[in-house]
Image: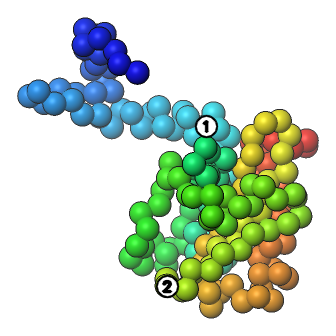
């Protein structure tokens, strides 16, 4: 959408007055105040501190990264993310964070199309990683999935089936209720 220059300038001046942008020479930059908008957006999506705690527990138990994703025209967008301490110290090749979009072929995106009780899994042999994801029980129009990415050594076939998938499904039910997608 093309906006007239005076309109854009008026918006920028208003944002500057409110402290969301700053002018440096002929350049505009966002200020740290925009985090307020981001945190408010996360809260409105239902990604509360309690939801983050559940993601952190999964990440810690499976020594990996837990992601909460919502359907997006390009695949799935990460709306919640937690990393185990060991994962934070490791150099991660993919710079994924809240707001990153994963493609339709990712485990988190594939889980969106599955019925509750099913799961998707995907191996990344080049990085020795494995991702397992489950859909969240949904009420309403939102489609979300919950997944864990960890080393292939942590995610043996038996552990995936007997421990990880049931833990993800329990967490998916709890998170779904917490963000108002499922009946209490």
- Picture coordinates of residue 3, whole percent (x, y): 34, 15
Colour theme: rainbow
Residue 62 visible, this orientation? yes
Q: Quadrant of residue 8?
A: top left
Q: Earlier in the sequence, mark 1 or mark 2?
A: 1
Q: Nearer the viewer, residue 124 or 11?
A: 124
Q: Nearer the viewer, residue 6 or 86?
A: 6
Q: Is residue 118 above or below residue 158?
A: above
Q: Which residue is mark 1?
A: 43
Q: Is residue 119 above or below residue 46?
A: below
Give the residue drawn at x 45%, y 33%: 36
Horizontally, residue 40 falls left or right of residue 23, namely: right
Callout 1 secondary element: helix
Give the residue drawn at x 8%, y 28%: 25
Q: Quadrant of the N terminus?
A: top left
Callout 2 secondary element: helix
Q: Quadrant of the C terminus?
A: top right
Residue 81 visible, this orientation? no
> Can you tell which of label 1 and label 2 is closer to the viewer?
2
- Picture coordinates of residue 111, whole percent (x, y): 74, 61
Give the residue drawn at x 17%, y 26%: 23
Q: Is residue 46 above or below residue 84?
A: above
Q: Which residue is mark 2?
A: 126
- Picture coordinates of residue 89, whole percent (x, y): 41, 76
Horizontally, residue 77 falls left or right of residue 25, namely: right
- Picture coordinates of residue 152, whole percent (x, y): 62, 87
Q: Is residue 60 above or below residue 28?
A: below
Give the residue drawn at x 83%, y 36%: 140
């Amino acid at each position: 959408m093309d906006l007239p220059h005076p309109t854009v300038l008026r918006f920028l001046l208003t944002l500057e007055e409110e402290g969301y942008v700053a002018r440096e020479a002929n350049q505009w930059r966002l200020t740290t105040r925009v985090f307020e908008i981001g945190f408010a957006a996360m809260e409105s999506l239902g990604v509360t501190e309690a939801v983050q705690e559940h993601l952190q527990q999964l990440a810690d138990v499976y020594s990996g990264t837990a992601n909460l994703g919502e359907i997006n025209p390009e695949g799935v967008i990460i709306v919640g993310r937690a990393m185990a301490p060991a994962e934070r110290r490791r150099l991660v090749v993919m710079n994924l964070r809240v707001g990153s979009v994963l493609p339709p072929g990712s485990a988190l995106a594939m889980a969106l199309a599955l019925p509750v009780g099913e799961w998707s899994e995907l191996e990344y042999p080049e990085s020795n990683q494995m991702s397992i994801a489950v859909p969240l029980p949904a009420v309403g129009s939102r489609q979300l999935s919950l997944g864990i990415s960890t080393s292939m050594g942590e995610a043996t076939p038996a552990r995936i089936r007997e421990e990880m998938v049931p833990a993800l499904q329990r967490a998916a039910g709890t998170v779904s209720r917490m963000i108002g997608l499922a009946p209490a």
